[in-house]
Image: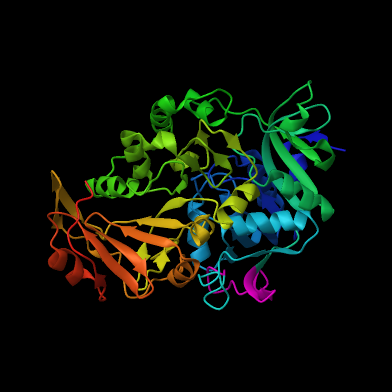
C-alpha cells in the first residue's frame, strides 16, 4: 500500500547497493526533487552508497549543480548504465576520468531489457548493435578503462541467426515523475511530455521485491479514467508531492492537453525556442544540407529526424508543403506531431499519440520507419559512422543505433569539415570560401555507431549529404554521387579526402 511521504522520507527507503532505474528522457521529466533528496542524504550520511543507476535515455537537467550530478560526483554511484549522457555535463567529464564504471547501450535496447525483466526474462535479444561499438567483438559497452563488465552484452545464436543479448542488473528501486496520484495511488501522466518506460520499470522493480517512488505534481480526489492510468496504485510504495514551478505557457504545447494543428506547429516551436533560449542561427552550410536532404522525403513516409543539422529538414519540408504529408516520430514515444529540440528534446508538438518508449523501439528495430535523417561526427572510407564519441567528449549512442539499424533509407547530414568552415551561395552556385580545420571524412572513425557492412547486408540505401556534395554507400565503400554547381570536384572534394572514392556522373543541381 502506498504512502504519501516527503522526499527525504521516501529516499530513506533506498539501501546501499541498490540498483535504481530512473524514468526520464535526456533532460525532460526527471524527478528532480527525488534526486535532490538523495543528494542531501548522501551528503549527511554517506549512504546510500555503491549504487547502480540505469536509465534508457539519461536523466540530467543540463546543469551540473542540479538533480543527480551532485551525488554522482560525491561518490554514491559505482555503476551507471545509460543510453545518453548529453544532459549530464559533469557526469560525462568524470566518467572519462575513470571515477566509476559507466556503460553505454543503445537506448531502445535498454528499454527492451527493462521490459523483459518486467516479464521475468533476464534480458532481451536484438539485432541492433551488431558490428558497432557495443558489440563485444569490437569495443563493448564500457566507456572508460575501468568499465570491463562483460555481462551486459553478449553475442548469441538462435535458430542459426546472430543476435546481441542485452541484460541489466536486477532493478530494485524506481524513481519517476508523474502528473497526479488519485486516492487509490493510481498515477496519471496527463501533463507529462512522455511516459517512457514507467510501467515496465515498476513491474520489474516489484518482481524484484523493490521500492517504487513517484514524484507527482498533485493529489486528486477523483480517480483517473482507467485508460489514463500509467502506473496502478498497487505497484507504488511512496508518493512525493512537489508542486511544479511556474513555467512559460509554451511548454503546454508538449502536454497534448489541447489540439495544435499543423498550421500552428511553427508558431509553437518559436515560442518554445524563446522560452528555453534554444533558438540559434543556423549556418548557411546547414541550410544547404537541409534543403538537399529534404528532397529525399516522399509522401506517406514515417520519419525520424535527429537533432542538430538534420533539424533543418523540417524547415524545408514545411516550405515545400511535404511536412503535411509525412508522419514524424520521436524516440520517447511520440508520433504524428512535430518533435521539439534543445532542452525539451523528447517532447512533441501536436502529437497524434504518445505511447511507451519500448513500443516506439519495436517500430524502429523492425524497420517501421521509411527514412531517417541523422547527424555524424565522422565517416570513414567504408561508410561507417561515428555519431557518439568526440575527442575528449562522450554524448552516448541514444536511439541512433536503433533508428539506423533497419530503416530502408538512412540519410546522414554533416558538413564536409568543421572549425572554420565558410561557404557562400549565389543562386544555385555554392562556393567554399574556407575549409574547416577538422575533417569529418577520415581513414578510421574513433568508434563505430553505424556499420556500413550491416547496411549493405540489409539492403539499405545510405546517403551522406554535405554542403558541397553527396556520397552514397556501395558495397565497395563511398561513391561520390553529386557535386553541387560552383564546387570544384577535385579541389573542394577529392583532394581533401584521405582516401579514394568511386565517382559518379558529375555535377548535379539539387536546388
At a point 32% along the width and 39% down the height, the residue shown is 316
Question: Closest to the observer: 15 or 385?
Answer: 385
Residue 229 position by quadrant = top right
Quarter of the N terminus within the rendering:
top right
Stretch in magenta: 141-164
Q: Position of residue 66 (x, y in %)?
A: 55, 44
At a point 15% along the width and 56% down the height, the residue shown is 432
284 on left or right of 314: left
Q: Position of residue 344 (x, y in %)?
A: 49, 39
At a point 51% along the width and 55% down the height, the residue shown is 403
* Farthest right residue in view: 1
Residue 162 covered by magenta stretch: yes
Question: Closest to the observer: 410 or 424?
Answer: 410
Q: Position of residue 336 (x, y in %)?
A: 52, 37
* Farthest top residue in view: 221
Q: Is residue 1 visible?
A: yes
Residue 415 covered by magenta stretch: no
Q: Where 495 falls versus 84 (above or below)?
A: below
At a point 37% along the width and 69% down the height, the residue shown is 383
Amino acid at each position: 500500500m502506498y504512502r504519501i511521504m516527503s522526499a527525504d522520507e521516501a529516499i530513506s527507503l533506498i539501501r546501499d547497493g541498490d540498483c535504481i532505474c530512473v524514468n526520464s528522457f535526456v533532460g525532460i521529466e526527471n524527478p528532480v526533487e527525488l534526486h535532490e533528496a538523495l543528494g542531501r542524504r548522501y551528503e549527511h550520511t554517506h549512504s546510500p552508497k555503491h549504487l547502480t543507476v540505469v536509465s534508457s535515455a539519461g536523466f540530467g537537467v543540463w546543469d551540473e549543480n542540479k538533480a543527480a550530478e551532485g551525488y554522482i560526483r560525491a561518490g554514491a554511484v559505482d555503476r551507471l548504465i545509460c543510453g545518453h549522457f548529453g544532459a549530464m555535463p559533469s557526469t560525462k567529464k568524470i566518467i572519462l576520468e575513470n571515477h566509476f564504471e559507466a556503460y553505454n547501450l543503445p537506448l531502445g535496447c535498454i528499454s527492451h531489457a527493462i521490459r523483459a525483466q518486467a516479464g521475468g526474462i533476464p534480458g532481451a535479444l536484438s539485432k541492433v548493435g551488431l558490428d558497432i561499438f557495443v558489440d563485444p567483438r569490437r569495443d563493448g559497452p564500457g566507456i572508460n578503462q575501468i568499465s570491463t563488465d562483460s555481462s551486459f552484452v553478449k553475442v548469441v545464436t538462435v535458430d542459426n541467426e546472430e543476435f546481441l543479448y542485452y541484460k541489466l542488473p536486477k532493478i530494485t528501486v524506481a524513481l519517476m515523475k508523474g502528473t497526479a496520484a488519485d486516492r487509490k495511488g493510481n498515477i496519471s501522466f496527463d501533463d507529462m511530455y512522455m511516459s517512457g518506460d514507467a510501467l515496465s520499470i515498476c513491474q520489474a522493480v516489484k518482481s524484484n521485491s523493490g521500492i517504487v517512488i513517484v514524484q507527482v505534481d498533485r493529489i486528486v480526489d477523483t480517480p483517473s479514467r482507467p485508460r489514463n492510468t500509467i502506473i496502478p496504485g498497487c505497484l507504488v510504495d511512496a508518493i512525493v508531492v512537489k508542486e511544479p514551478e511556474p513555467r512559460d505557457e509554451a511548454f503546454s504545447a508538449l502536454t497534448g492537453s489541447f489540439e495544435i494543428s499543423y498550421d500552428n506547429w511553427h508558431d509553437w516551436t518559436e515560442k518554445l525556442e524563446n522560452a528555453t533560449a534554444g533558438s540559434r542561427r543556423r549556418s548557411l552550410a546547414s541550410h544547404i544540407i537541409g534543403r538537399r536532404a529534404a528532397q529525399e522525403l516522399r509522401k506517406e513516409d514515417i520519419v525520424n529526424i535527429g537533432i542538430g543539422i538534420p533539424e533543418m529538414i523540417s524547415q524545408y519540408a514545411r516550405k515545400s508543403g511535404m511536412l503535411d504529408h509525412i508522419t514524424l516520430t520521436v524516440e520517447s514515444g511520440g508520433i504524428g506531431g512535430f518533435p521539439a529540440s534543445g532542452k525539451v528534446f523528447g517532447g512533441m508538438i501536436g502529437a497524434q499519440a504518445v505511447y511507451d518508449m519500448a513500443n516506439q523501439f519495436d517500430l524502429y528495430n523492425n524497420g517501421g520507419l521509411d527514412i531517417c535523417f541523422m547527424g555524424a561526427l565522422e565517416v570513414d572510407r567504408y561508410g561507417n559512422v561515428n555519431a557518439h564519441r568526440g575527442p575528449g567528449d562522450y554524448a552516448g549512442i541514444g536511439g541512433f543505433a536503433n533508428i539506423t539499424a533497419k530503416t530502408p533509407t538512412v540519410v546522414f547530414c554533416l558538413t564536409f569539415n568543421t572549425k572554420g568552415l565558410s561557404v557562400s551561395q549565389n543562386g544555385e552556385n555554392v562556393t567554399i570560401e574556407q575549409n574547416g580545420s577538422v575533417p569529418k571524412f577520415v581513414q578510421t572513425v574513433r568508434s563505430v555507431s553505424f556499420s556500413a557492412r550491416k547496411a549493405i547486408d540489409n539492403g539499405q540505401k545510405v546517403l551522406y549529404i554535405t554542403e558541397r556534395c553527396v556520397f552514397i554507400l556501395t558495397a565497395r565503400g563511398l561513391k561520390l554521387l553529386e557535386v553541387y554547381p560552383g564546387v570544384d570536384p577535385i579541389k573542394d572534394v577529392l583532394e581533401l579526402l584521405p582516401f579514394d572514392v568511386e565517382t559518379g556522373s558529375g555535377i548535379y543541381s539539387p536546388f
